Amino acid sequence: MSLGLLYSLIGAALAIFLCGIGSSIGIGYVGREANGVLSEEPEKFGTMLLLVALPGTQGIYGFLTGFLVIMKVGILGGKEVAITPSQGWQILISCLPIAISGLFSAIHQGKVCAAGIAVASKHPEASMRAMVYGALVETYAVLALVASIFLLFGVKL
């Protein structure tokens, strides 16, 4: 395995793992709150589900970025490309916006959505308003995903 390929795969792994860790922590925060509500009012499951699922999107974004790297370097469904160490570093650095932003935004989105669970439990008609606040945190994960994709497409192999 070339050093360039190794750097590329480290970038893919960081995107997948850090976003997955952030999503797990975020879902843990909001899931804990939702389970507290559901223990007394199980009929509110549908209302809580969207708020619980929202922090999981960063894990999907990290997986998508990692998948794009794997496709770019030719490991999956193609011919492996010769990658210089410099190109490998460029790919690794391209993965950092979503890796870092996905980690932190998922955690904070989980905290925002956990607070939204408290709102939705007392005022079910306000659950969509609570979701808007969670979606505002999501905006920065989406921007990081777009930045990582643009950077990846900019790396010439």
Image (tube, helix red, strand yellow):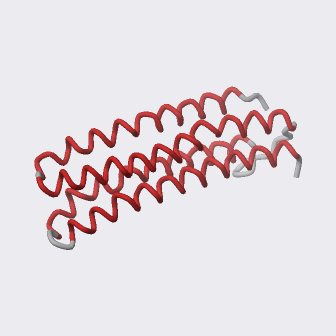
Above or below, 35 against 58 in this view is: below
Horizontal relation, residue 53 to residue 102: left or right: left
The residue lying furthest to the bottom in this view is 39
| Residue nearest the viewer, comparing 43 with 109 | 109
What residue is drawn where x is 18% and y is 51%? 119
| Residue nearest the viewer, comparing 50 with 140 | 140
Quadrant where the C terminus is found in the figure: top right
| Residue nearest the viewer, comparing 23 with 91 | 23
Above or below, 35 against 145 in this view is: below
Q: Position of residue 60 (x, y in %)?
A: 49, 50
Horizontal relation, residue 142 to residue 115: left or right: right
Q: Position of residue 12 (x, y in %)?
A: 67, 47
Q: Position of residue 93 (x, y in %)?
A: 70, 36
What residue is drawn where x is 79% and y is 45%? 7
What residue is drawn where x is 72% and y is 37%? 91
Residue 140 sits in quarter: top left
What residue is drawn where x is 84% and y is 33%? 86
Horizontal relation, residue 11 to residue 35: left or right: right
Say how many tags the image has. 0
Q: Position of residue 105 (x, y in %)?
A: 46, 43
Horizontal relation, residue 118 to residue 71: left or right: left
